[in-house]
Image: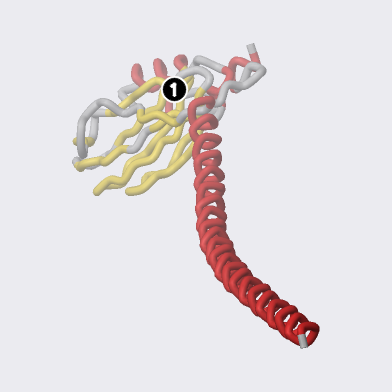
Amino acid sequence: MTHLRLAATAAGLAIALLCGLLALTALDDTRAHRDTSREAERVRALSGQLVVVRGQSDQLTAQLATLQTENSALRNDARSPTLPMWNACTGPCAIGPDVVRVGSVPDTFQLLLSFTADVPVRSYVFTFHQWTQFDSCGFAVRCVTGSYQASDPATSVDTTFTDAEGCSAYVWVIQSDREGTIKPDVRVHYQPADHPTGVCANS
């Protein structure tokens, strides 16, 4: 009888111990599940932040590429600038018979001669010697010798003169046979030649 009681007590203790172990295992499992859920939530949050960071990184990379392109363009402009040249008047200028508008073409530059007018206008690029001939002859080209750049009478002109890239020897001239106004856009573009150009190449 005593053996049976001891066996029953041992069995009861074993069952209680087993139940306790199962309860602890279930508790640990619940904690582990909760911890796993928390970690999974953190991973999802971090993944979302990573996507945002990647998006910002892509945006910053695109902005950097844009800035590098702009920087390159600014460097090119600084190395070879295009500058306004006309300063004879601030807006439309009067033009007419017996009057010309004249300006020098700087050495190491291209001349970008452009204008619109309400009357036909002729334009020329002369050497200094040709300008003297033209001026002495009452602004008539019949007295000018040698070759020179000329544009036929027009109300709109847009031309480029490149012989001054390696030569300081030119002036540009515009004239009209009728009274009118001209709106100029005369610019020069820095483009130095590595050799004499135009009439300087012949001297």
Q: Residue furthest right?
A: 3
Q: Quadrant of residue 91?
A: top left
SS at badge 1 = strand
Q: Quadrant of residue 3?
A: bottom right
Residue 140 shown left or right of residue 160 in the figure: left
Q: Nearer the viewer, residue 116 or 149?
A: 116
Indicate whether 153 appears above or below 74: below
Across and down, in percent, residue 31 comes to 57, 68
Q: The residue under label 1 is which amino acid type?
A: Val
Q: Quadrant of residue 175?
A: top left
Q: Nearer the viewer, residue 135 or 124?
A: 124
Q: How is the image coloured?
A: secondary structure
Q: Residue at 50% across / 17% down in the picture?
A: 107
Q: Residue at 50% across / 15% down in the picture?
A: 168
Q: Nearer the viewer, residue 62 or 165?
A: 62
Indicate whether 114 appears above or below 22: above
Across and down, in percent, residue 80 comes to 52, 27
Q: Residue at 56% across / 47% down in the picture?
A: 61
Q: How many marks?
A: 1
Indicate whether 173 appears above or below 45: above
Indicate whether 56 appears above or below 162: below
Q: Residue furthest front?
A: 1
Across and down, in percent, residue 145 comes to 51, 23
Q: Residue at 45% across / 19% down in the picture?
A: 106
Crowdedness near tag 1: few (<14), some (14–19) or many (≥20) residues, C-alpha within 10 Å: many
Quadrant position of the N terminus in the picture: bottom right
Residue 201 shown left or right of residue 132 in the figure: right
Quadrant position of the C terminus in the picture: top right
The residue that disc 1 covers is 105
Q: Nearer the viewer, residue 137 or 111?
A: 111
